[in-house]
Amino acid sequence: MATQFLISLLLLSGYALTSATEFGRPLNRKLAKLKKKEQLTHFKFYWHESVGGSNATAAIIIPSLPQYTNTSHFGSVRVIDTPLTLGPELSSKLVGRAQGFYAVTSRTDLELTMIQNFNFFEGKYNGSTISVLGRDVALNETRELPVVGGSGVFRFAKGYVELSTYLAEPIAGNSVIEYNLYVLHY
Ligand SMILES: *[C@@H]1O[C@H](CO)[C@@H](O)[C@H](O)[C@H]1NC(C)=O
Ligand SMILES: *[C@@H]1O[C@H](CO)[C@@H](O)[C@H](O)[C@H]1NC(C)=O
Ligand SMILES: *[C@@H]1O[C@H](CO)[C@@H](O)[C@H](O)[C@H]1NC(C)=O
Ligand SMILES: *[C@@H]1O[C@H](CO)[C@@H](O)[C@H](O)[C@H]1NC(C)=O
């Protein structure tokens, strides 16, 4: 029954059945469960980093080159597993986690190259991820990271996320960043 349905779909869509040895072939988007139109969704959440203490959400895995330890920290790499919350307080609703790493990639300024996967927990987004990769000029008022893709409901995703610092406590090693994510997906 299911096979018959598949075959009639294939015939309807005008594509011939191809041999199993073919590497790539055109596919009707219905078969990939793609909707006709892309939609734009805006997400707003807060990203919490704490560098020190037993609940650290960021760990330095590579220290900076010695000659930059008092300046830009060029060369240092941190791995992160940071909570994403609906409001700016850490106690507000947990909507996901950001997992990935970032490196200081400027010899003169606090400029980061960030690689992050947002893993969302809410409703229909639960279990779906968004991947971002970009340049974060940490001391700038706003920064922008491109969305490079996604999984689950975010397959074929593209877009960007705007970062703005909500709270920075450099001595304690805590920061809260507001994330505004704009994503096109099906
Ligand atoms: C770490 O988190 C736990 C559970 O949320 C909390 O009970 C504890 O006080 C926290 N510790 C620190 C040092 O913040
Ligand atoms: C960094 O600063 C510390 C304390 O001021 C100093 O002892 C150290 O020599 C400095 N390191 C470099 C590479 O300049
Ligand atoms: C998200 O999915 C996981 C695993 O399927 C489930 O355990 C969890 O309760 C879900 N969370 C929400 C908020 O629906
Ligand atoms: C720095 O911030 C300004 C406005 O706040 C923005 O226009 C500019 O694109 C930002 N530059 C970078 C490199 O993010």
Image (cartoon, rainbow, N blue to C red):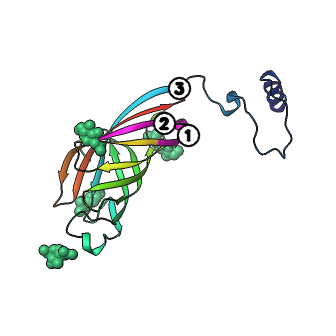
- The residue located at (80%, 31%) in the rendering is 2
Tell me the CA gap for discs 1 and 3: 15 Å
Earlier sequence position, callout 1 versus callout 3? 3
Q: Position of residue 78 (x, y in %)?
A: 35, 62
> In the image, ligand 1 is in what quadrant?
bottom left
Earlier sequence position, callout 3 versus callout 2? 3
Q: Which residues are magenta?
A: 148-164
Q: Secondary structure at mark 1?
A: helix
Q: Position of residue 114 (x, y in %)?
A: 38, 53
Task: Report if residue 161 lies within the magenta region.
Answer: yes
Q: How many marks?
A: 3
Above or below, 69 against 165 in this view is below
Tell me the CA gap for discs 3 and 2: 10 Å
- The residue located at (31%, 59%) in the rendering is 106
Earlier sequence position, callout 1 versus callout 2? 1
Question: What numbered label is drawn on residue 91?
Answer: none
CB contact under 8 Å: marks 1 and 3: no
Say what amino acid the circle numbered 2 marks.
Lys
Say what amino acid the circle numbered 3 marks.
Glu
Question: What numbered label is drawn on residue 38?
Answer: 3
Q: Secondary structure at mark 2?
A: strand
- The residue located at (23%, 45%) in the rendering is 140
Say what amino acid the circle numbered 1 marks.
Gly
Residue with the mark numbered 1:
152
Above or below, 7 against 177 in this view is above
Write down the quadrant of residue 108 in the picture. Answer: bottom left
Q: Secondary structure at mark 3?
A: loop
For disc 3, the neighbor class at 10 Å (few under 14, some 14 to 19, many from 20) is few
Above or below, 74 against 118 in this view is below
Question: What numbered label is drawn on residue 158?
Answer: 2
Q: In this view, which residue lies farthest toward the front? A: 108
